Image (cartoon, rainbow, N blue to C red):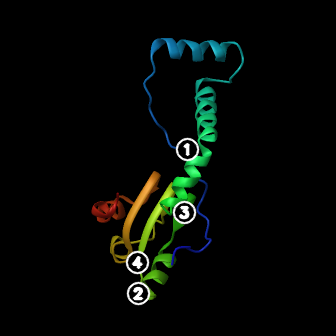
Amino acid sequence: MSNPSSSKPPKPVDEKITINLGCVDLGQIELLVQEGFYANRTDMIRTAIRNQLAAHADVVRQVVSRKTLVLGIQHYSAADLRAVQEAGQTLQIRVLGLATIAADVSPELALATIESLTVLGALHASPAVKAALASRIH
């Protein structure tokens, strides 16, 4: 059972990352912002990242296909996992993007139904579920 129900969680907030830049790179970014090419540093950095991702889109698609990754947002509710459990199955979750495990999922239900969890991006789950699945997260 690889396609959970279509119950939609709220749109996730952006993930925050920290990067270190050299003074020259930062100065060039500041110059482009001052000259009006970008609204702010974040706008410039997001644009640069999106351009690089677009340039490598074919490679990403090939790897996603080869590794059988779900691309985007994958949400698992307690009802989804109970259905997996009732079918006597377990999940090998592989997501490139965001995997969410609903707040109503107990650690016991997660352990009974999630065999492994690979997320290239972000995992949103309760601290108790993350702790229970720690040895299964790759």
**Tag 1's secondary structure?**
loop
| Mark with earlier residue (3, 4) | 3
**In terms of image quadrants, where is residue 41?**
top right
Q: Position of residue 91 (x, y in %)?
A: 43, 73
Give the left or right position of residue 106, taking residue 33 as reference: left
Label 3 and label 4: CA atoms lie apart by 16 Å
Look at mark 2 in the image and give the residue it sits on.
88
Disc sitting over residue 74 in the figure: 3
Q: Mark 2: which amino acid? A: Gly
**Tag 2's secondary structure?**
loop
| Mark with earlier residue (1, 4) | 1
Disc sitting over residue 14 in the figure: 1
Q: Determine contact: label 3, label 2, CB under 8 Å.
A: no
Is the residue 42 above or below the residue 125 in the image?
A: above
**Tag 4's secondary structure?**
loop
Label 4 and label 2: CA atoms lie apart by 7 Å
Q: Mark 4: which amino acid? A: Thr
Q: Nearer the viewer, residue 102 or 33?
A: 33
Picture residue at 61% right of the left edge, 70% below the top? 7
- Count of numbered badges drawn on the protein: 4
Look at mark 4 in the image and give the residue it sits on.
90
Picture residue at 30% right of the left edge, 60% below the top? 134
